[in-house]
């Protein structure tokens, strides 16, 4: 009983003490709150001039950045539009993408075009998403269209898919075929201008649909593309994290580093697996002629990002977006058609505008070292085979690769092709008067 009473008394004393402390503490809390408010007010009053300076500096920086972005977007559109001027201007902005450069290097290409991407990558190490904040024309268009749309809460819960696209694309590139290169926002922006000054077909509309899709995405879910899906933005984040990861490893005990490492190996493995499912033998089929100096079809399809620069820049309009004639690996990869013109010996434009090296730079002298194809004659549709006079293809060939051969038995002439001299320029096909064409250039 004594212990019970003592316990009850002590419990009562403790409760009484707590109540007294609360009662006494309330005015003290009020006084403390008042003191804190006075202190904050005085501190705010003291910091007001500096805060105004900071606000003015922030507004000035925002205005400058907006002006720079608008000017860059206008310059990019002017370079993408087919117009007179140096052809290389169309390749300047796409070649600045670190994502495109990563895929090109992983696929085995290289050249001067990588220097711009290296400079951008170095800037992104010190300034987060420098390219997105100051340069990217696709991002500028999205902000202009959907800058007033409120952010969606669910967008923040979407995983960062862009990093997976980078790793999987790099893995496939190391195995021989870089995928997702056409998801680069600069490629999407430039491809949208393929409808200007041409008679677009279904594939041209498909290639140009990327930018409108981005704008619709920005309206529906602002920040989804730039923050979660864009592989170019993810490449900038990965470059910065690669150089400045020491603080992260120290704070999270290495868990973030382990997750990143698993993502790298898994992504590279998925990309390599995709490539193994698409062996090189399936990539090239007869009948598909690629742009000049592009080399083997397998090399071209793995380096081409489908930006459409060569399609827009070709003065004769013979380069167009391709379909599935070379398999699904070559979808939208540019093809050559000689229905409306041919490829002159002196033309080197497509090599100047390619941002990835899929069409390497070439000169008039070395252009013919890598033939686009070889002419094939169908005497069943040739006018000479019908006993009529012709020879348009023989007279037009600039390489003297065609000749007339007299057959004393049939008492008729036929066209013969010197495969070693033929470069596949398509002049013979262009001037052939037969319907359908009796001579066509086929891929070699």
Image (tube, rainbow, N blue to C red):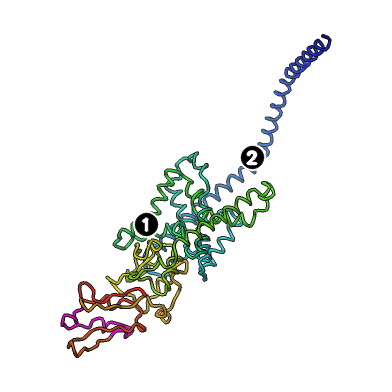
On the picture, is 374 further left or further right than 302?
A: left
Badge 1 is on which residue?
Answer: 208
Q: Secondary structure at mark 2?
A: helix
Residue 405 in the image, given as x and y percentages of width and height? 24, 88
x and y percentages locating residue 255 in the rendered image: 64, 48
Camera-nearest label, 1 or 2:
1
Camera-side residue of 112 and 137: 112
Which residue is located at x 70 percent, y 32 percent? 39
Q: Is residue 276 above or below residue 426?
A: above
Residue beneath the point at 36% across and 83% down: 420
Q: Quadrant of the C terminus?
A: bottom left
Magenta highlight range:
382-402
> Along the horizontal axis of the image, is 422 left or right of 175?
left
The verdict on residue 387 being magenta is yes
Q: Residue reaching furthest right?
A: 2
Question: Contact (CB < 8 A) between labels 1 and 2?
Answer: no
Residue lying at 18% horizontally and 87% vertically, measured from the top left: 410
Q: How many neighbours does mark 1 have within 10 angstroms: few (below 14), some (14-19), or many (20 or more)?
A: many
Taking depth in this image into account, of 72 and 262 the one nearest to the observer is 262
- Label 2 Cα crowd, 10 Å radius (few <14 / some 14-19 / many 20+): few
Residue 93 magenta: no
Q: Could you tell me which quadrant the N terminus lies in? A: top right
Vertical placement of residue 371 versus 303, above or below: below
Residue at the far bottom: name it: 408
Q: Secondary structure at mark 1?
A: helix
- Residue 340, image x and y in percent? 27, 71
Above or below for 153 versus 328? above
Q: Nearer the viewer, residue 185 or 130?
A: 185
**Residue indicated by mark 2:** 48
Label number found at residue 408? none
Q: Is residue 23 visible?
A: yes
């Amino acid at each position: 009983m004594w212990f019970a009473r003592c316990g009850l008394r002590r419990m009562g004393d403790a409760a009484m003490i707590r109540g007294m402390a609360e009662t006494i503490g309330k005015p003290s809390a009020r006084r403390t709150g008042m003191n804190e408010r006075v202190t904050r007010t005085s501190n705010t009053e003291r910091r007001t001039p500096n805060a105004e300076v900071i606000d003015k500096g922030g507004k000035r920086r925002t205005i400058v950045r907006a002006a720079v972005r608008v000017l860059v977007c206008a310059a990019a559109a002017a370079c993408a539009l087919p117009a007179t001027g140096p052809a290389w201007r169309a390749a300047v902005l796409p070649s600045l993408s670190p994502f495109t450069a990563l895929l090109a290097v992983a696929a085995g290409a290289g050249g001067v075009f990588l220097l711009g991407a290296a400079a951008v990558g170095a800037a992104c190490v010190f300034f987060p998403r420098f390219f997105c904040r100051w340069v990217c024309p696709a991002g500028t268009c999205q902000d202009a269209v959907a800058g007033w749309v409120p952010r969606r809460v669910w967008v923040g819960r979407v995983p960062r898919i862009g990093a997976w696209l980078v790793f999987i694309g790099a893995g496939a590139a190391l195995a021989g075929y870089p995928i997702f290169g056409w998801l680069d926002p600069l490629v999407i922006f430039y491809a949208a201008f393929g409808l200007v000054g041409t008679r677009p077909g279904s594939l041209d509309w498909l290639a140009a649909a990327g930018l409108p899709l981005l704008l619709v995405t920005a309206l529906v879910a602002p920040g989804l593309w730039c923050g979660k899906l864009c592989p170019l933005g993810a490449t900038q984040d990965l470059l910065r994290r690669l150089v400045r990861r020491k603080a992260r490893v120290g704070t999270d005990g290495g868990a973030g580093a382990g997750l990143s490492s698993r993502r790298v190996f898994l992504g590279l493995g998925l990309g390599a697996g995709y490539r193994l499912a698409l062996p090189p033998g399936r990539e090239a089929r007869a009948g598909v002629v690629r742009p000049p100096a592009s080399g083997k079809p397998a090399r071209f399809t793995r380096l081409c990002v489908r930006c459409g620069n060569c399609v827009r820049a070709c003065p004769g309009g013979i380069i167009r977006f391709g379909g599935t004639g070379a398999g699904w690996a070559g979808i939208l990869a540019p093809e050559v058609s000689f229905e409306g013109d041919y490829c002159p010996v002196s033309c080197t434009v497509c090599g100047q505008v390619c941002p990835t090296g899929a069409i390497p730079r070439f000169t008039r002298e070395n252009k013919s070292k890598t033939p686009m194809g070889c002419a094939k004659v169908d005497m069943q549709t040739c006018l000479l085979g019908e006993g009529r006079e012709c020879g348009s293809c023989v007279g037009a060939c600039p390489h003297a690769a065609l000749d007339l051969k007299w057959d004393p038995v049939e008492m008729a002439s036929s066209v013969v092709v010197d495969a070693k001299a033929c470069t596949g320029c398509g002049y013979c096909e262009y001037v052939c008067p037969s319907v359908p064409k009796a001579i066509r250039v086929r891929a070699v």
